[in-house]
Image: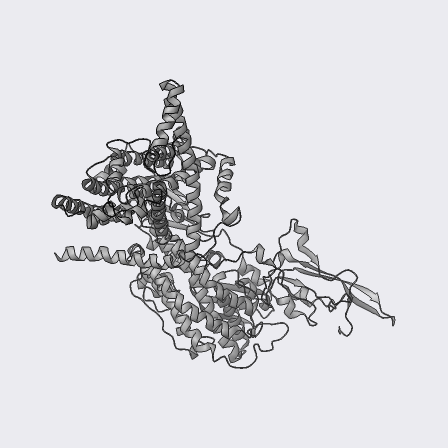
Amino acid sequence: MAFSIYDFTDLAQSIHNGLSSSLTPVWTTVIEWAIIGILYILFVALFGLFLVYAERKVCAAIQQRIGPNRVGPYGFIQTIADFIKLLMKEIINPKGVDHFLYNLAPYIVIATVFIIISMFPFAPGLQSFDFDIGVFFVTAVSSVGVIGILLAGWSSNNKYSLIGGIRSGAQIISYELSVGLSLITMIILSGTMQISGIVNGQADGWFLFKGHIPAFIAFVIFIIAGTAETNRGPFDLPEGESELTGGFHTEYSGIKFAFFFLAEYMNLFIVAAMVTIVFLGGWQPLHFGTGNGFNAAMDLLPPIIWFFLKVCTIILLIMWFKWTFPRLRVDQILTLEWKYLLPINLFNIILMSVVVLMGWHW
Amino acid sequence: MAEYREIIFNSDKIQTDDYFVNIGPQHPSTHGALRIVAKLEGEIVQSIDPVIGYIHSGIEKMCESLSYPQLIHLTDRMDYLSAHMNNEAVCLCIENALQVEVPERVKYIRTIMDELTRIASHQLWWCATGMDMGAMTTFFYGLRDREPILDIFEETCGARMTFNYNVPGGLMFDIHPNFQKRVKDFIRYFRKKLPEYDTLLSGNVIFKERTKGLGVLSKEEAIAWGVTGPSGRASGYSCDVRKLHPYSAYPYVKFEEKLATDGDTFWRYQLRIEEMWESMKIIEQLIDNIPEGDFAVKMKGVIKLPEGEFYQRVESARGEFGVFIVSDGKKNPYRLKFRSPGFSNLFVLNELVKGVKIADLVAIMATLDLVIPDIDR
Amino acid sequence: MKALFNYIKEVLGGFYTLLQGLGVTGKYLFTPWNYVTQSYPENREKLQMFERFRGEVIMPHNENNEHKCTGCGLCELACPNGSIEIISKSILTEDGKKKRIIDKHIYHLGMCTLCNLCVRACPSDAIIMGQKYEHAVYNRSNLTKVLNKPGSKIMEGIKE
């Protein structure tokens, strides 16, 4: 079995060959699906728990605390213990909830996460789906998650939840625009919507550097809008714990709450991964031009490590925002989108088109 | 838009109901067991109705059965963030009634402790305001800087919040030998940290946008509702008891009564930050000049006030705090009434929140600096 | 044109204030070893309370199991909330006189507000404030304490 940390294409191919040599094509597909599914579930659970731990440590550092330090070395097992606690907790169904929607909502939210993550290339050959409209698919699916939040707010039979759900709807639908437009800006530069195509196009330099000014503006806007879309940072209005005591997930407990919680952190990962793929070259090492010594040195680090390094940096940045800024008000959040981000974004698209047309990018 | 509303709300077919949300008694932003019934239209607050009394403990009634030295410790439990001012108010009232002149040393120490308490209270208020606005980190920075003050208190009078440091006629102990050094260290430290508060929260564009022009309280309204303290001074109502009716060592120090004219949430916030600077100035003027002398005058074993009515006001961290004692010449008061600043400051809230969002309600409530035991007593 | 200029200025100015805020938190974020937390149960041995710390009322005894309390009851009178009860008994002294001495000095920690008035009232400094700060017990009755140790006597030379 050929295995290389630098390129997973051979590994995937040899697994496929091994399976199909002994099984019928139908069973091959089923088993491959099962393997991929288990891998994604493991990844979401473990990386989600890691993110929860990381956030607690990051906010502790910002607030001059130690953070979790009791369970395991440096409190590393703390989030796993918390997760086990959540699993064992009673699932409370409050009186008067719409049972079907109330139970459905967390699954919508978590299922969206899985669908989007399946689009991401973690390393060469480590990608499940590769559409020719990949970026479009990601933005389309990510807006399904808001339905889960809206349903949760609506069906909980709680006024705080309802306000939180409605806020979340207004917010996410608005910020979809900015996310979409800043992605379009980069698609103009890359010339393709296919995620593998975008990543491969950055082999001789990341788009952030290739598209200089317009790409940088798009980068900033994407991070702001992405943070807003994950209900985090200064945009955590749907939860708004000082106003709404928990917002849309006030009434959830146990594993259903864990789903919302996990989905929130995985959405954080999704935003960071999208930034990485579109602006920072996905798994591509830091390259300038082609075939020089610097590039060769950068190639020594495996692509999967590059990917997660960049993702973690962006996540750190977003966490840093969250623990610094006060929360915006609901009308300000919409003002920010419609009066600032959207016009800047439209202008930026024109700027990027001019840059691409004139060939000013690298 | 108006037509649309008319169709929705005045239609015979669609039955609408007022949308009430209970904020509290268990809610993260009421800082205690305060219940606010908010009538909403969507996100917009129509009117609110504060419901108080969830932690009413009958302190005024309890005081009637306690002797004068005993009842002082109960005032710690009212406005626990300005406990020393409350203690001092009762002591000043008793001393005035008995016409006892306390030593200069006592006056100086009381004033320094007052101002330290004021800084500590404003620090905690700053933490909580930041947290209500969603900036969690402010909470920890404020508490971090409050810790040295609490250490000073603990070293001086043995407790961190409920001091009971004043007794009629003076203080319970003399200051600790380390007191001056520690206070000076703290002032040096806090002068460096206070600009950080400005950079982190006051200068922040999000914070400014959220607070400027929000919840405007006019000077007339402030006077009419009896809003005192920094909340009243933000509206231009000059109500600083330290200036108007100086007590303890305040006549000896130079300080400014900070006033603003806007009366909005931002200025209520800003004035408290500026008060911290002023408090540090007052402490610096006094700390090196504490005169030698006794820390208490000898009082009788059983303190009996002459028959009559006595009132004493002090400036607590939240506004004017008054003590009204009716004495019938016995060793315990016939009636005792506290004028607590939080009570008046809370009930102006309904005037401020008409037409604002829920998030603004929380912000306005935060800058009124409510302490619930102070309201409920 | 001026409106556009103002718009850009507003956006950039807003960003600048946000960056300043990030600078404040970033300073601490990248120096995580500068924390101010105390690891509480670990530093229990080293944790030293201030000498005036008011933890509980205690009655110090010397090595001969003697205390200074005469049982005069002034602390009981001074206490605002009845946390102190003095139970005294009469004994016959050697010269045949009746004398009242302390039998039990009962202290209800659960009711105590640690106001220090009893310590102030005590004429013979028999009770002082202790340094103990961990008062959690499993049973409420454990909060009621008898301050004078069994079999203890009053110290020589303490006048009534």
Classify residue B334 by image quadrant.
Answer: bottom right
Observer-nearest of B193 and B113:
B193
The answer, for residue A163, to whether it is visible in the render is no
Which residue occupies 24% across, 58% down? Answer: C13
**Is C19 drawn above or below residue A151 in the view shown?**
below
Task: Indicate whether A360 appears above or below A125.
Answer: below
User: Which residue is pictured at 70% across the width and 72% down the height?
Assistant: C124
What colouring style does the render use?
one colour
Q: Residue furthest bottom?
A: B292
Judged left or right of residue B139, residue B293 is right
Q: Nearer the viewer, residue A334 or C22?
A: C22
Give x and y (percent) for residue B311: 48, 70
User: From the viewer's perspective, is residue A215 above or below residue C94?
Assistant: above
In the shown orientation, is residue B196 left or right of residue C78?
Answer: left
For the question of whether residue B230 can be seen, the reply is yes
The C terminus of chain C: image quadrant = bottom right
- In percent of width and height, residue B142 lies at 43, 60
Q: How many marks?
A: 0
Closer to the camera in the image, B42 or A328: A328
Tell me where residue C95 appears, x and y as whole percent: 87, 72
Q: Is residue B216 left or right of residue B320?
A: left
Q: Horizontal and vertical percent for residue A146?
A: 32, 36
- The picture quadrant where one finds residue B294 is bottom right
Q: Quadrant of the N terminus of chain C?
A: bottom left
